[in-house]
Amino acid sequence: MARIAVATFQHETNTFAPSKAGFAQFESGGGWPGYTVGAHVLEVIQGINIPIAGFVEAVRKKGHGVVPLVFANATPSAQVTDDAFERIAGDLVRQLELRASEIDAVYLDLHGAMVSERFDDGEGEILARVRRVVGDRVPVVASLDLHANVSEAMLRRSDGMVAYRTYPHVDMAETGARTASLLQAIFDRQERPHKLMRPLDFLIPLTAQSTLAQPCDRIYGELGRRETPAQAWLSFTPGFPAADVPCCGPAIFGMGFDRAALESAFVELGSILEAEERNFQAEFMSPDHAVRQAIDIARTASRPVILADTQDNPGAGGNGDTTGLLSALLTHRAPSALLGLLIDAPAARRAHEAGLGATVEFSLGAKSGLKQHFPVVGRFTVERLSTGEFTCVGPFYRGAQMQLGPMAALRKDGVTVVVASKKVQAADQEMFRHMTIDPQSFGIVALKSSVHFRAHFGPIAEKVIVVAAPGPMLADPAQLPWRRLRRGIRLKPYGPAFRPPLGGSA
């Protein structure tokens, strides 16, 4: 049986975000396990919905051995610092070099939208360094996030890549297992598959990429119908539309052992995606309009109205500390409203110092230093306190052991805001329930998330409203100050084509 080296190095990079990912952010893990090297990797990934866990389980069932290298994952942010990239990539390569002579294959759990201070294509560079160690003799396969910005270098330097098919990402472990099936086919056939990729010509807003709605539900259904078990692995990545690099954008790619069949599938999928462009357009509401509508609906609803604070989503590079939606809830005196998670470590510490039941003045949010962003100042009552340690139970974060530092629930009028010390997007009800706060008991629930919340909160929602409150992750990609995209790509469905600004580069 084969011995397979396995490693995770994931980061989703929003080049417009307010803060970068240093090594400390990988050490903390951002909701996933913290930075781990060597044998302990297999311990920290157990029972979690992540690709490497699904891959390891699948190859072990086939009798293969695994050689863990590193596990590194940080919350989305601006570029990965050179220090963090070199330390993690250095550990990965050194671990691989030590075992290279006994390795039969390499599996990498990558995101596909990593940008470092030095490298526009972080995954392409990681794959290049792995190839320098193992050469062409050893198959190298990778799993990718649905939001990958796939480059030609990534395709060229790997023998196969497989991407998630759900957003919310409830199939991360399953994608690892699908990647294992591709590697097993390479072993069985003793040959490498053909590879094809086709970039699309327009950027897709993040909130239009949900597979719980059209057109993605329909597209992924067509994708699955064109796959042939053990013969072809097809992927569609809508892309991460906040990375100002030439490879940013959607793509279809695939691997297969029958080139003619693979090419035929690509022609069909390309036609389907072109026909669906009009259905990728997204709509957003202002905070005031959204809160007013939510209050009206909640008066007669039996379930909460969910407000998605998409432009401050920590899962897309936001710091979770903007206050536009919170201000609107307070201004309109929204009854029975819950907001979270607001990331503000000083406020959480102040709540713990004041103690349960205390009513004191807080200055909430706006800690990132973003221009035209201001804290909410007022007297709040401390209603709940927590250490921020709990295990998630929802479909997306399932099994993740959160360590968010001091947390507090603060109440003013009819609004309860849950404050945490470390950023993570609000995509699991346990973030509130572990503090004995039941989201279902509120009329309005405001979440700093774009889509992942739908996996756990969607089933309890009367209605979901996507809110474009001021924040660093602009929901409409056409509004971002692009400089380095590939020339001609449209900035949104049926939007204007990109032209490099004077002094910029294509």
Image (cartoon, rainbow, N blue to C red):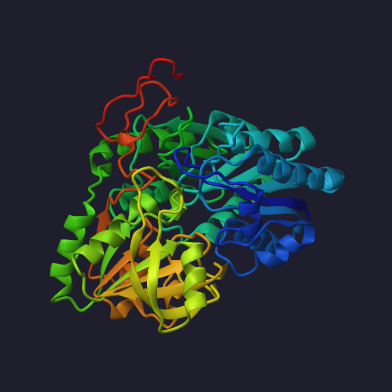
Quadrant for the C terminus in the image: top left
Instruction: Give the left or right position of residue 15, taking residue 269 as reference.
Output: right
Q: Nearer the viewer, residue 92 or 24?
A: 24
Quadrant for the N terminus in the image: bottom right
Q: Position of residue 205 (x, y in %)?
A: 33, 43
Q: Residue at x 51, y 63 (%)?
A: 345
Q: Position of residue 250 (x, y in %)?
A: 41, 37
Task: Tell me where residue 258 sits by quadrant.
Answer: top right
Position of residue 225 relative to residue 14, above or below, is below
Q: Residue at x 27, y 37 (%)?
A: 277
Q: Nearer the viewer, residue 346 or 125?
A: 346
Q: Nearer the viewer, residue 403 or 69?
A: 403
Position of residue 212 relative to residue 273, above or below, is below
Instruction: Give the left or right position of residue 247, taking residue 312 as reference.
Output: right
Task: Tell me where residue 426 sits by quadrant.
Answer: bottom left
State the count of labels.
0
Q: Position of residue 236 (x, y in %)?
A: 43, 43
Q: Nearer the viewer, residue 453 or 46?
A: 453
Q: Is residue 276 visible?
A: yes
Task: Tell me where residue 445 sits by quadrant.
Answer: bottom left
Instruction: Give the left or right position of residue 53, taking residue 337 as reference.
Output: right
Position of residue 409 relative to residue 245, above or below, is below
Q: Residue furthest top?
A: 502
Q: Residue at x 72, y 53 (%)?
A: 70
Q: Residue furthest front?
A: 361
Q: Position of residue 328 (x, y in %)?
A: 24, 60
Q: Is residue 221 visible?
A: no
